[in-house]
Amino acid sequence: MQLLLFTLLVLLFCPSSCVLDVFWASYSPSDGILRVQTSLDVLSLGKPRSSLKTMCYLVDDEPPACGEFDVMVKSEDGGVVKTWISLQTKDGRKGGGPRYVTGILLDKEEGLVATSQVKRVKGKGMVGVTLVLTLTKSDLDRSNVLFRTLGKFLGDGVERFLVVAPDEQVEDIKDRVGGSLGGLGVDVVGEGGLFQNYSQDWDKYALQMSIKLLVSKIVETDFYVTLDADIVVVGGVKGGDFVRGGKGNWVMEERRVHPDWWVGSGALTGLPVDVNDDTLMGDEKMGIGVTPAVMSTAGAMMAVGRIKAVAGAGGGDWEDDWIGSFGRLWWSEYTTYKLALDAYGVWDTLHERFDDVQVTCWNVWWEGDLPWKAEEVFKQQKVCEEEREGERDSKRCLFSVVQSTSGVRWEEIEKQMVDLGVL
């Protein structure tokens, strides 16, 4: 696979669907070949044909597969150029071949000209969302509130609850939380299976962040929601709160809140971030929040593919180069995800802010934010519900983050909710 390193120099001239379209894709398991047909409407492109140079395809979590644009051209009809290409994909894929493919067109300056929609190679996928929780035995007691409140407020459209744990702890964790939660299947899987060269020597925090991207390999829905053990569910959780019309909800945050994360992710992905650009760093639409977060399965794969292309460029162990860099580089899973999807021009294809849903509220990040009071939280939730019934604009809130580093006592939070009749 050719290494692709480019910056976003050229904006799309119209929605990508009217310019570049992956309209057919088929995988042959016998030879590991993915055959793709793409159309390009040159008349709607807004750029001369002579300025075009490279056509790339993003296939799951592989580095971009690129080739000279003119070499791929097979026919032209009424200003629409159609290309056919066969891509060799890696063997041993679970589920019988690649799941997603996206086309990207670059000009001679390696600026992004157009991006296609994300095309599913196989079927429509499972409808709804998957909840993903990274969990260790030491987290079990404080995760009790998460599991109890999720069982209380779980709604339609959540298809699966996936718990990812250290391999040696899977059975113990399965005994505590595996099985079913409010009718939702809870599957506990070992984290080692997500890696090619798993190492327990990696920083534990970096390992958990990487899992939130790599879990895209085994998620069967097109979107998933990441969770941590220090989350309280405070409102009805439905699939439609996270995904609508093929786009995932997201939380905006200015980049200057965590500038080191953006610089580190920029180095990790080969997409430098200028922290002195006040316009960029202060635009919350250019940033992204933290857990809980709605992730596109295809988008997470693209981010991993981007990391592979850069970290693996020297021919070494790309996973170790990536995860082992933490401490030297301060990156996060979400800043890496956002940078990659922005660079590939697919962010607006995969994400949209929902005005009527607030993903988190009444959060406790530091000791000074305490105490967390269940009575106030659910009183305000009731007020918001009454406002919505009266057709007034009022956002529904889904989660409250209560960081364990604040020194919170989780048994007190659970007792508050029991005394209030919530649990």
Image (tube, grey):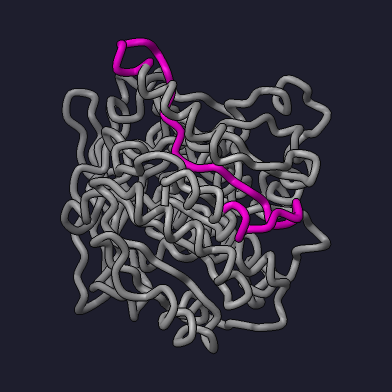
- Residue closest to the eye, 100 or 246: 246
Q: In this view, does 199 lie above or below 80?
A: below
Find out whether residue 407 is within the magenta segment: yes
Inspect this view and state whether residue 136 appears.
yes
**Quadrant in the rendering for residue 43:** top left
Residue at the image position 52 percent from the left and 60 percent from the top: 212
- Residue closest to the eye, 32 or 86: 32
Q: Where is residue 408 in the image (x, y as percent from the top left)?
A: 70, 54
Q: Is residue 262 above or below residue 8?
A: below
In the picture, measured across the screen, residue 279 lies left or right of residue 6, that is: right
Count of labels shown? 0
Q: In this view, does 376 lie above or below 356?
A: below
Residue at the image position 47 percent from the left and 52 percent from the top: 418
Q: Where is residue 332 in the image (x, y as percent from the top left)?
A: 66, 52
Q: Position of residue 88 (x, y in %)?
A: 34, 68
Inspect this view and state whether residue 51 appears.
no
* Residue at the limit of the structure toward the front, as seen here: 419
Q: Where is residue 170 in the image (x, y as percent from the top left)?
A: 47, 83
Residue at the image position 63 percent from the left and 75 percent from the top: 138
**Quadrant in the rendering for residue 310:** bottom right
In the picture, measured across the screen, residue 33 lies left or right of residue 209, that is: left
- Residue closest to the eye, 70 or 28: 28
**Quadrant in the rendering for residue 40:** top left
- Residue closest to the eye, 100 or 165: 165
Q: Give the range drawn in magenta.
A: 387-413
